[in-house]
Amino acid sequence: MAEKRRPWHGKVRKIPLFLAGGLLILLANPTLPGTLIGIVMIFLGEALRIWGTGHLQKNETLTVTGPYAYVKNPLYVGSILIAVGFCIFANNLYILAAATLMFCFHYIPYKNRIEGDRLKRIFGKHYEDYAEKVPDYLPRWTPYSDQKSPWRFRTFLENREAGIVLLGLLGILLILSRPCWHFPF
């Protein structure tokens, strides 16, 4: 049976993310320690995502280089670091708790099923071996293989990570400027 294409589905699923981000910014009450810790976590998470997207060649080859040699889902690990960093930065543990619940109980199971099935269909036994030997979120100490592939800026751009970087910088600027906002109510 052919898989149904729903181009709007990905966009609709992002609405809660933008609502949570907007709420986080509106309710932000940054403190100096939270700002320092949060920004470090955001930059570490984004650095991991940049490293990963420079290696990721979706559906062309099974990516087992860069961070994928150590952890199966480096983009998710980076996203988790970014989300936690923003919540600490904004001093809002309620949104952190809600985001953690949504990510762990909705997003991860959904994406693991969809991506796992797709990768198994495309790469077969090679993916099954990789999936068995490489952990989902906590990295291995040694690389999965000794295969080498350079990080590529073009691949980073093709994976549209530059937009995520800009969105993160915008979020940081908005939260930093939040104490200057004055509401009439």
Image (cartoon, rainbow, N blue to C red):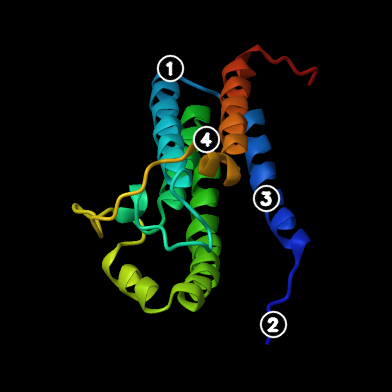
Q: Which residue is mark 4?
A: 92
Q: Which residue is mark 1?
A: 32
Give the alpha-carbon distance from disc 4 to disc 2, as whole Å. Answer: 43 Å
Residue 2 percent coordinates (x, y): 69, 82
Q: Could you tell me which secondary element the residue under label 1 belongs to?
A: helix
Q: Which mark is residue 140?
A: none
Q: Nearer the viewer, residue 97 or 147?
A: 147
Which kind of residue does numbered mark 1 sit on? Leu
Q: Quadrant of the N terminus?
A: bottom right
Label 1, label 4: how far apart the Cα atoms are: 14 Å
Of the two numbered discs 3 and 2 in the rendering, the one whose residue sits closer to the viewer: 2
Q: Residue furthest left?
A: 141
Disc 2 packing (10 Å; few <14; some 14–19; many ≥20) = few
The answer to which of marks 4 and 3 sits earlier in the sequence is: 3
Please tell me how crowded label 1 is: few (under 14), some (14-19), or many (20+) other residues with Cα within 10 Å. Answer: few
Which sits earlier in the primary sequence, circle 4 or circle 2?
2
Q: Earlier in the sequence, mark 3 or mark 2?
A: 2
Q: Residue 23 in the image: x percent, y percent? A: 66, 37
Q: Is residue 116 above or below residue 178?
A: below
The residue singled out by tag 3 in the image is: 16
User: Label 3 vs label 2: CA separation?
Assistant: 29 Å
Residue at 31% across, 54% down: 69
Looking at the image, residue 29 sits to the left or right of residue 43; the answer is right
Of marks 1 and 2, which one's residue comes earlier in the chain?
2
